[in-house]
Image (cartoon, coloured by chain):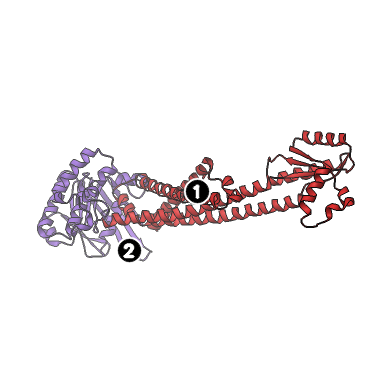
Chain colours: A purple, B red
Amino acid sequence: MIEFSHLYKSYDKKIHALKDINLKIDSGEFVFLTGPSGAGKSTFFKMITGYDNPTSGKITVGNFDLNAIKEYDLATYRRKLGIVFQDFKLLPDRTVYENVCLPLRIQKHHESFIKKRALEVLDLVGLSEKIEQFPEYLSGGEQQRTAIARAIIHQPGVLIADEPTGNLDPEMSSKIIDVFEKVCAQGTTVVIATHDHELVKRKNKKVIELMNGAVHRMSL
Amino acid sequence: MKEYKQKSIQRVTAISIIGATFAVILGFYLLSKNISHILSIWGESNKLIVYLDSDSEDYIRRSTQLRLEKNILVDKVVFFSKEQAIADFNAQISGYMSGIQNDGALLQVIPPYFEVYLKTEGTLEELNAKAKAMAIEVREWNGVEDVSNGSLWTEKYSRLSQSVSAFFMFLGLILFALSFFVVSSSIKSHLFQRAKEIEILEMIGATKFYIQRPIFIESLGIIAVAFLIGLGVNSALFFYFNSFFENQLKLLNLNQVFQFFNFFELFIAFGVSVGMGLLVTRLTFSRLYRFRHA
């Protein structure tokens, strides 16, 4: 499903963000991406989302060869992804409901289907009471859950989340991970970057540990 | 909500700046158009004075009048007999030089003449050239003593008119360049403030068309509203000045010759403005993408 082959990413030929990454994540797998700050987790995600190109090496996600992907195909590809950004990236002038609906609106789904799905996922992340709120009136945790709802509303093939539980209390963290597991059970490949070692231990999933831009450890 | 208000403020700011720019440009165009029009109207009383020999026979006068009237350039011919010419001369000059009307020898040389009004077709320059050519031709006719076409005055007038047109054209070009800059800056600032929104939409799979379409429509809306504001300001000023000239400066009769934009001019101006807005939006998008991927 996701395959990195001898992938390198350097900035200004001095900073080597990723070094010789070789890995394979199968379809429907649940993977934790760990490592200290600066280990290369964000760059790893930038490669998967097609936000940045590798300096060398190859990356394929499903049928998409991201090295040679065309602009129009990139939009098609991204519609198959669900992304939870570390800084949430919510549109501040739209309500929670409107933010969550965006992926389905972009895919031109029928409004009644959009509404049904939006209410489902908002209920799943516990935000049914906040649908008319603007992001600035939400707490950090609520904003994060809005971003999660937006990432899963279109049942993506791959879900990537950068520190999705960073702003949540343990109870809500657990609930959110449950949501991700449910999504994964429906066939979605889930990759979660986290610092939460307790969570990683508890869930007993595949772990990819990055260190200084290289894969330090990979364990099931 | 704060962001929503901010976006509205950005839109209002862009509309105000672009609207003010359009008001100035349309105003200058209207001013230039009316000044050129007034100059043309004032310059239109182009005529030749054909002086006959003092002792010319009546049949020569009639044949000359006939030939003049047949000329395709001529609109109207008015004959002034020697007696009328002397009476006019006396009426005009006696106030300044009393006693001159008793100078029989001097009055004797005043000839009968024709005032030949030319058709006002074509530009002032063309009219002037035609009058000059006709004067040369008529001067050779039998019984004609001299022809005055006031060429010195019309040439100077024509040059003044050309200079005024050139000045306004130059000013128009400067204003157009300035307006491009102002529109460009406003749209650019408006778009760059939405860079984050564009990036988010891209990341969740929106195509360029999906992202750009509402922004192009918004730019068009801003330009259209700004254009209407500019036009509204000019309409108000036009009707104010028209009524001012009608009520306060009746003697100039300017209110009768002032012209507002015609449909064609408005269509072109609107088209150019919208085109400029679209071009600027397109260029700004390219710049935004370059800036982000740099």
Q: Report whether B23 appears left or right of A164.
A: right
Q: CA distance from mark 2 to mark 1?
A: 70 Å
**Residue type, numbered disc 1:** Phe
Residue name at image x 14 percent, y 45 percent: A185
Residue at image mark 1: B239
Secondary structure beneath dot 2 equals strand
Residue A51 picture location, percent across and down? 32, 54
Q: Which mark is residue A16?
A: 2
Q: Chain of mark 1?
A: B
Q: Is residue B138 positioned above or below B158 on the image?
A: above
Q: Chain of mark 2?
A: A
Residue A210 picture location, percent across and down? 23, 61
Q: Is residue B42 positioned above or below A138 on the image?
A: above
- Which residue is nearer to you in this view: B74 or A158? B74
Q: Quadrant of the C terminus of chain B?
A: bottom left
Residue B7 picture location, percent across and down? 33, 55
Residue name at image x 35 percent, y 47 percent: B211
One can see residue A5 in this view: no
One can see residue A192 in this view: yes
Q: Quadrant of the N terminus of chain B?
A: bottom left
- Which residue is nearer to you in this view: A90 or A92? A92
**Residue type, numbered disc 2:** His
